[in-house]
Amino acid sequence: MEIEVSIGISARHLHLNKETYAKLFDHELTVKNYLNQVGQFAANETVTLLTSKGKFENVRIIGPLRDYNQIEISASDARFLGIEPPVRRSGEVFKAALITIETSKGSVTLDNCIIANRHVHMNPQKAEELKVVNKEIVSLKLAGEKSGVIDVEVTVTDNGYFEVHLDTDDANAFLLQNGSKGILKI
């Protein structure tokens, strides 16, 4: 089966828990704009990510606050920062790469930095329709000047919006933009 799907490109960002957020900010997390994934938003609040080798300023927090901390960067970002984060699915941050998060209020150093795996979000109804299950690997065909086929992992959540998430390295390799289309081969 083949089905068209929209591509969402994830630039470097982070998810924080309440405790860590309170160490970095004195106010509630505020909404800049809502994302396609139901209930999630890009926050107005940003941080600086830093290591002994480099830093990235104005890195956006994605809300709402979670039960865990997770910093997501690309492999290119990691090389610039001089770290080697593992490729992992969201939430699997145990013993990942060490990085410091800094704001004008303070800083915290965490071992929760990952390169997010390529994945396709969907709700249970869409998964049933496509006859796929959570964590299953499916193929994504990308057309264009730099076409190709890559694997993506199925991520099924109750309010998952049907969309593939790639990081900026993957998007640049295939000359993709937010909203580009691909074909899932299941």
Image (cartoon, rainbow, N blue to C red):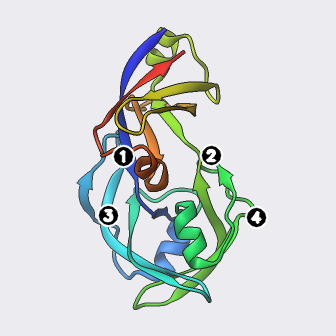
* Local secondary structure at mark 1: loop
Crowdedness near tag 2: few (<14), some (14–19) or many (≥20) residues, C-alpha within 10 Å:
some
Q: Which of the numbered marks, if any, corresponds to residue 95? A: 4
Q: Residue 59, how many percent across, how many down?
A: 40, 71
Q: Give the vertical position of 23 relative to 158 (above or below).
A: below
Q: Is residue 61 left or right of residue 92?
A: left
Crowdedness near tag 4: few (<14), some (14–19) or many (≥20) residues, C-alpha within 10 Å:
few
Disc 3 to disc 2, C-alpha distance: 22 Å
Q: Which of 154 and 66 is in front in this view?
A: 154
Q: Earlier in the sequence, mark 3 or mark 1?
A: 3
Disc 3 to disc 1, C-alpha distance: 27 Å
In this view, which residue lies farthest toward the right? 95
Q: Give the vertical position of 117 relative to 29 (above or below).
A: above
Q: Residue 140, how many percent across, how many down?
A: 49, 28
* Local secondary structure at mark 3: strand
Q: Nearer the viewer, residue 182 or 118?
A: 182
Q: Residue at x 45, y 49 (%)?
A: 173
Q: Residue 21, how many percent across, how many down?
A: 47, 73
Residue under label 2: 89
| Res 70 visible | no
Q: Which of the numbered marks, if any, corresponds to residue 43? A: 3
